[in-house]
Amino acid sequence: MRLTITTALHKALDLVGTTIQKVTKITKPQFKFFVWLIKRWWMLPVRYNFLSLSRYGGYSDRAIRQQFSNPLPFMELFDGLYRPLQQKECIMAFDPTFIAKSGKQTPGLYPFWNGSDRRAQKGLEAGVLALIDVEDHMAYHIEATQTEIGAVDVDTPAAADGNKGTMEQYATMITSHKATLQPYSSVVVVDGYFMKKGFIDALTTEGFQVVTKGRRDASLKYLYHGKQSGIGHPRWYSGKVNLERIDKRRWKQCYQDEEITAYEVVVYSVSLKRKVKAVYVISAKEKGYELLISTDVTMAGDKVLQYYHLRFQIEFLIRDAKQYAGLEQCQARSTEKLYNHWNMALFSVSLARWLWWAKLPQDQKQDTPFSMRAVKAACLNQYMAETIFSILGLDMSSKKVKRLFNQCLNIGNIAA
């Protein structure tokens, strides 16, 4: 029997186990498997597939496949583990990511946009939803959902025939969990691809507010605030916005530092058919400008700027999941197994951030950057050290043996 000692890893697993039992109706075999899986996922040094997992003891290849055939309760786990974040300022970020996948039998294979190669490639796409702690600048995974194949734009006639459009799918990935998500935040931050009426209307109808990046050629109109003549239709607008040279008499400066200057104004968006808060960002070093849009016209311009910049935290979450948690390495071909693999990869990174970094005192966070590589190294070192010390039959009550054991945990540990 392998020797185990009380360490930060075991305390983390105990916390997760307690949370799982409280917030989900998971069966005892599923509970045992999930706790086992988290530890293996953190330390696995090879490709993430069922055969590799089975080689580190506990479950056979066949048993792991059977467990993965039932969707695990990741949404309930998120709500149970990260509930303290309801007391902090948070926003949500959504970003579809391309998942490379070979073979011809996997459901959902389709030419999706691959941002790394800047072209469409045949593979899979996962819509990743994350919660971002504004104070800590840290993203935590909520859920990843597969995009269906053959989707069309929600504004096209094909969508009305029952074929769910791309934008409608993306919106449903967020609005379907409205009751769980809105206690954390009602602000969803997305990139400029999502500045489409179908997507924004679907979210705002359900009580969400959207912050996104506007097109450089966006059609905007100034609102008319003067006296109405009282004859005929009231005047709503007072001219089109010239984004190449804005009228600074109408735009109010909302932020300035050494790198950028930002101006804000409430305008009417022709494409969205609604009033929006527009933030015009000018760089001190580069030519041109950026246009940010918020559907909440009462949101301060500096907040719009801050929230959009924080959107990039979801990119770091996806990057860590691809580099250190095998997000793109699933060899399964069923929808359920793909769902569990993707969410397990992102969930393991988020959980490591929450347990090893977010729990630090606020004054230590600035000097302690999070490194998923360091977490993987520590977990693998602990697994190997426990195995070797147990086989040798060493007495762990000895101070010298404990000191040697702790030295083994820090092998290869570097900062981010």
Image: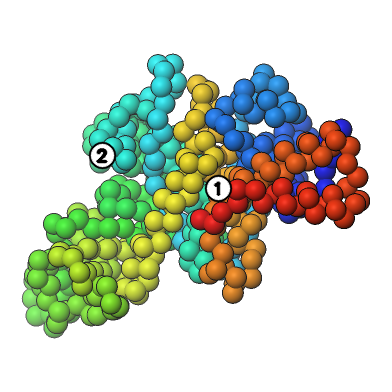
- Describe residue 237's horizontal placement relative to residue 92 as left or right: left
Identify the mark at residue 346; answer none if there is no mark: none
- Residue 337: percent from the left, percent from the top? 56, 27
Say above or below: 379 vs 400: above
- Residue in view at x 41 percent, y 50 percent: 315
User: Which type of secondary structure does the marked residue at label 1 adopt?
Assistant: helix
Q: Nearer the viewer, residue 399 or 170?
A: 399
- Describe residue 105's horizontal placement relative to residue 256 as left or right: right
Q: Which mark is nearer the camera, 2 or 1?
A: 1
Dot 1 crowding, Cα within 10 Å, few <14, some 14–19, many 20+: some
Dot 2 crowding, Cα within 10 Å, few <14, some 14–19, many 20+: few
- Residue 215: percent from the left, percent from the top? 19, 55
Say above or below: 304 vs 214: below
Say above or below: 89 vs 49: below
User: Which quadrant of the structure image shows residue 287?
Assistant: bottom left
- Residue in view at x 72 percent, y 33 percent: 33
What residue is pinned by disc 1? 373
Q: Amino acid at mark 1?
A: Arg
User: Which type of secondary structure does the marked residue at label 2 adopt?
Assistant: loop
- Asked whether the viewer can see residue 380, the reply is yes
What residue is pinned by disc 2? 118
- Describe residue 183's horizontal placement relative to residue 150 as left or right: right
Q: Amino acid at mark 2?
A: Arg
- Residue in view at x 66 percent, y 21 percent: 61
